[in-house]
Amino acid sequence: MRNFLIFMVALSIFSGKAVAQRSCAAEEVLAQQLLNNPEMRQIRENIQRHTEEFMQSGAVHERTVVTIPVVVHVVYYNSAQNISDAQILSQIDVLNDDFRRLNSDASNTPAGFLGVAADCEVNFCMAQQDPNGNATNGIVRKSTTVNGFSTNDNVKFNSSGGSNIWDRNKYLNIWVCNLSGGLLGYAQFPGGPASTDGVVCDYAYFGTINSTPPFHLGRTATHEVGHWLNCYHIWGDDGSSCSGSDLVSDTPNQADENYGCPSFPTISCSNGPNGDMFMNYMDYTDDACMNVFTTGQKSRMQSLFSPGGARNALLSSPGCQPGGGGGCDTPGGLSASSITQSSATLSWSAVSGASSYTLQWEEAGSNNWTTVSNISGTSYNLSGLSAGTDYNFHVKTVCSGDESNYSSDYGFTTSGGGGGCQDQYEPNNTRNSAPVISTGVSFTAQIAAAGDNDWYRFSNTSSQRKIKIDLTTLPADYDLRLYENNKLRAISQNGGTLDEQIIYNTNKVSSSYYAYVYGYNGANSNTECYTLLVSLKSTNWRTDGSVDGPVTELEIPVQFENAGFGLFPNPAADILTVEVPMQNEGDVSVSILDPSGKSTMSQQLSMGKNHNRINFDIQTLPNGVYFVQVRSEEMTKIRKFVIQH
C-alpha cells in the first residue's frame, strides 16, 4: 500500500496518457466504502464466509460455465474518448480469452505455476437487450462536460456528468472514460452499493485497438473484472512486510507489487524457487507480462455464482438474449449536444428502412414522458427545458407496417440553474464573456451544473497593485485561478469546501486580470452560492497566515534533496515553508497532495533568487503523510512530509 500511494502521487507530475506503471484504486475504493458504511463490513465478512464454505465443500468442481451480460458506458468529453465499437468488442474478446485461459500468451506461464493455472469458466457477452427488454448492442454513449473523472463514482450518474447504471443483478457495468491522475481503472468488490457496482477503465487502456502501451492488450479490464469477481491484489496490499494475503492459497506470498515485466524467478518473502507470481492478472505488471489466474482465484469467482452467492442473480439474466423489436431495428448512437440552460439537440443513428422516428423525453425520475412523432431525420431540437435539470430521452423506429421498441434511455443535464440565490452574471462561461466586477465588494454566484464555470474581469491600479482573491461559502469542491490576459498567474485548489485564496503581489498594472471559478471534477450546486471578493492593496499581502505586525523572516536551514527544493519543518504542525532554488525569475507551481494524489492546497506565483519561499497554513489538514510537488520550467520534483499537530 505504501509504495502504491507514493506511485500514485508520482504519476500526478506527468501529463498526457503515457504512464510508466500500472495503477488501480479498487482496494482504496473498498476501504472508503467500508468507512462510509460500517454495515458493509459485515456484508464483506459474510461473502468471505460463503467463499470459504464453497471452497471447502468442493463445489467448484461441479460448476458450469457462467456467461455474464456486459453493458459498456462510454462517457466522453471529446472524440478521442468516444472509442469505437470495434475497440469495445476487442476488450470483450480479451476478457473471454483471459478468463477461459484461451489467451495466446498462456504458454508464457512458467512451468512451476502451470499446475495451478486455471480456466475460470467465466464468459462475457455484449448485452443484446436492455433492462426494458428492448434490443441493444450493449453500448451506451454519453457526451459529458467533465474532462477527467476520479474514484468518487461521478462517472456512474447522469446527474454528475456520467451514465446511470443498468441493473447490477443482470449486467456487468463497465464505464469507459477519461480517468485523472494517471489512474488506469478501479472496480467495486461484491457487496458494495447497487448504484455504483461495476468497473471503470480509462479509455486509453481499454481493448487492443488504439490503446496505449504498455497497457494496450486489454489487461486493465481483466485486472479490474478480477476485483469485481472478488479477487484481491496478489501481494495483499501490505507494503513490503510479507504479512498481507490475497486469501488465496496457491498464489505465493510476495513482498510488494511488481511493475514492468520482471525476470523469472523474482524472489521475495522467501518464496523460492519460483518466487513471485508476477504474471498473475492481479499483480501490477505490464499487459504483455500478464497471463494467468489460479485455481484458488477461480474458486473465489465461482463462489459468487453458487446459491447464496453475491452475484448469483446474474445466472438468470436475460441480457445475452436478443431483445424485442421485430424486423424494424431499434435506433442506437443516442447523444445530446448544443446543451444550454433551456435547450438541447438530441440525435441518434439512422436505421435502414425507417420511414420516421418517434421520440419521448422526460425530466429524470418524473415518468411523465412527452412524445414527438413523425420525425423524418435523425435529430431533434428540444426547447423549453429548465436550467440545471436532468432529462432522459429514447427513440423508436417506425418502418412500413412495423415499429421497433424504444431504445435505452439517454440522459443529459441542462446548464445553469436557479435555487436559493441569484446568479446575476450568467452567461460567463468563457473569458470573452467575463463581466467586469468591482474590487473590494463581495458578491455571490453559482456553479449551477457540471461543466458550468465562471469568469470575471477586474483591474488593479498604479496605487493599488497587489491582488488578493477570496472564494468563500463554498457549497461544493470549487477551485480558483487568476489569469493576466490568457496567462495563468496563480491557482488555489484546496480539497472539499475549504475556502480558496490567491495572493498575487505583482507590480504590473493591467485592466485584464481574470478570476476563474470552477468545480473540481464537475462539482456544482444549483441551490447554493459561493462568495467572491477581489481586494487590492498598495503593499504586499502577507502569505504566512498572519494578519498584522511586521513580517519576520526566519533564516532556517532547509534540507535540499537531489538539488530539488527544501521544506521545513518536517514533521510540520501549523506552517510548512517550501523553498525553491531559483537561478532566474519564473513561474512556479507548488502543491500539497494527499496520499491519493489529490491536491489539497496549491499556489502558483512568480519567483526569483530573493523571493523563493512559499508558506502553507496546514492547520486544517489532518495528521498523516503528504507530498509537496514543485513544478517550474526547470524541474518537476516531489517530496514527502508529515503533518503532526
Image (cartoon, helix red, strand yellow):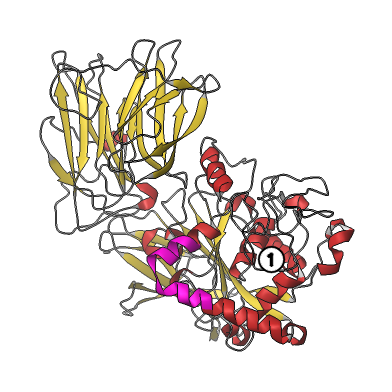
**Label 1 sits on residue:** 92
Whole-percent x and y of residue 215?
Answer: 68, 49
Query: Hey, what amino acid is under mark 1?
Result: Ile
**36 in the magenta segment:** yes
Q: Which residues are magenta?
A: 30-45
Looking at the picture, does residue 512 appear above or below residue 289?
above
Whole-percent x and y of residue 71?
Answer: 57, 70
Report the number of numbered marks. 1
Q: Is residue 53 left or right of residue 8?
A: right
Looking at the picture, does residue 162 appear above or below residue 210?
below
Please identify the quadrant where the C terminus is shown.
top left
Looking at the picture, does residue 582 appear above or below residue 137?
above
Q: Main secondary structure of the magenta part?
A: helix
Q: Residue furthest left?
A: 441
Of 619 and 539, the residue lying toward us: 619
Q: Is residue 131 left or right of residue 262?
A: left
Looking at the picture, does residue 328 appear above or below residue 622?
below
Whole-percent x and y of residue 178?
Answer: 52, 50
